[in-house]
Amino acid sequence: MLGDEAVTRAAEVHLVASHITKQFGAHTVLEDVSIDVTKGEVVSIIGPSGAGKSTFLRCINFLEVPSEGSISLDTLTISVVNGKLQNAGKDLATLRRKVGMVFQSFNLFPHLTALRNVTLPQERVLGRSRHEAEERAMDLLRRVGLESKAQSYPSQCSGGQQQRVAIARALALDPLLMLFDEPTSALDPEVGTEVLAVMRQLAEEGMTMLVVTHEMRFAQNVSDRVLVMVDGRIIEAGEPGLVLTAPQKERTQQFLKAVLRQ
């Protein structure tokens, strides 16, 4: 019988990724990866290039269909068995509505203003009216410090501003979970701090977040947990203070030494 603490944790689990494997032909990119993320938790995933981190994020919202495994978010579970999706297409649409994703590249529509980039998905996906969508968009642009850029096109915004518009766009669909795939990797360090500040604010407000990052300071100061992924497997996981300052695995130690020398 579960104790009270275990029951409470089970009730709060927001995301469960179970035995996720992803193969591209004969190449295995992810091998039996399982994690759970509780509501309001910030989990950072670190590791060398080619470890499978971005692929794992894309499997969570099925931008990449896993070769095997299941993803559960809230009350919805989507499974793949022997490479075959076990759910209807409407389940995929439901999952993707509940998961916001911010990519390395900003993926904004270049011919639309910042405001329209944030309103259009609301109208198409949630069926909001133009007026409702614009109210929500302006609220979010204020939240990320870009109210003054509402009528600007992406080409008129800096990289950091474009990434903050992308965050506002993802938040506009009221996701249960936010995925960030190296959101500052294409930005100069000074500009990247603007984006990290928004992410820190979201964490403080209780947004559930899974973040692939090379920003060790963010991982240590904002994350509740850090996962280390190498060769398609999670080799170490725990509180940031333990994983980043006293890692147990030799491969983690090697990675952190290389990162901290940069």
Image (cartoon, rainbow, N blue to C red):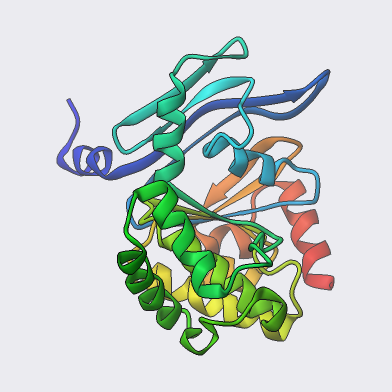
Res 246 seen here:
no
Q: Residue at x 58, y 27 (%)?
A: 20
Res 213 seen here:
yes
Judged from this view, the residue extending furthest toward the top is 82
Foreground pick, 94 / 201: 94
Q: Position of residue 260 (x, y in %)?
A: 77, 70
Name the quadrant containing residue 117.
bottom right
**Which quarter of the image is occupied by the N terminus?**
top left
Q: How many marks?
A: 0
**Would you place residue 185 above or below residue 86 in this image?**
below
Q: Residue at x 61, y 41 (%)?
A: 58
Name the quadrant containing residue 30.
top right
Foreground pick, 115 / 11: 115
Q: Residue at x 62, y 81 (%)?
A: 193
In the displayed structure image, the side of residue 145 where residue 73 appears, left or right: left
In the displayed structure image, the side of residue 167 where residue 8 appears, left or right: left
Judged from this view, the residue extending furthest toward the bottom is 148
Q: Residue at x 31, y 38 (%)?
A: 74
Q: Position of residue 158 (x, y in %)?
A: 69, 82
Foreground pick, 193 / 234: 193
**Would you place residue 176 above or below residue 55 in this image?**
below
Q: Position of residue 86 (x, y in %)?
A: 47, 14
